[in-house]
Amino acid sequence: MTEVLTVLIVEDSEDDALLIVEILRRDGLAVTWERVQTAADLSPMLSTRRWDAIISNHHLSGFDAPTALAIVREQGLDVPFGVA
């Protein structure tokens, strides 16, 4: 059985999020994912499940990857965090 990678994508473009998921799947990964666009959306989403990875756009409207990483760290999570 293939293990499913659970990914949280911090991205303001749905098309870009779909592209990230497509790339992961093309590399042979089974992916379950959610997308958030704001800091206000990120905080509660972090506690909804155990995330295997978080992928963030570097700069979003009024929000950025360093801020997203700070929110993840504030919640004490040890999750791989990448910037796309």
Image: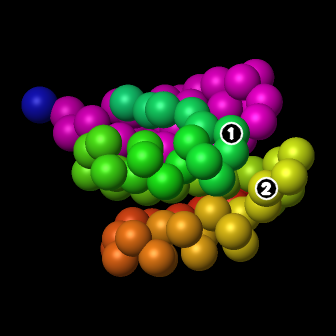
Looking at the image, which is closer to me, 24 or 64?
Answer: 64
In the image, residue 36 above or below residue 53: above
Q: Mark yes or no: residue 20 visible.
A: no
Residue at horizontal 68%, vertical 45%?
Answer: 38
Residue 21 falls left or right of residue 15: left
| Amino acid on which disc 1 is placed | Gln
Assess whether residue 54 is covered by the magenta stretch: no
Residue at horizontal 69%, vertical 68%?
Answer: 67
Residue at horizontal 88%, vertical 46%?
Answer: 61
Q: Secondary structure at mark 2?
A: strand
Farthest-out residue, left? 1
Q: Whole-percent x and y of residue 43? A: 49, 54
Q: Which residue is mark 2?
A: 63
Labels 1 and 2 touching (C-beta < 8 A):
yes
Q: Secondary structure at mark 1?
A: loop
- Which region shows up in magenta? 2-31
Q: Mark 2 or mark 1, which is nearer the start of the sequence?
A: 1
Q: How is the image coloured?
A: rainbow
Q: Whole-percent x and y of residue 57? A: 75, 51
Q: Which residue is mark 1?
A: 37
| Amino acid on which disc 2 is placed | Phe
**How far is the residue under mark 1 from the one under mark 2?**
8 Å
Q: Mark yes or no: residue 7 visible.
A: yes
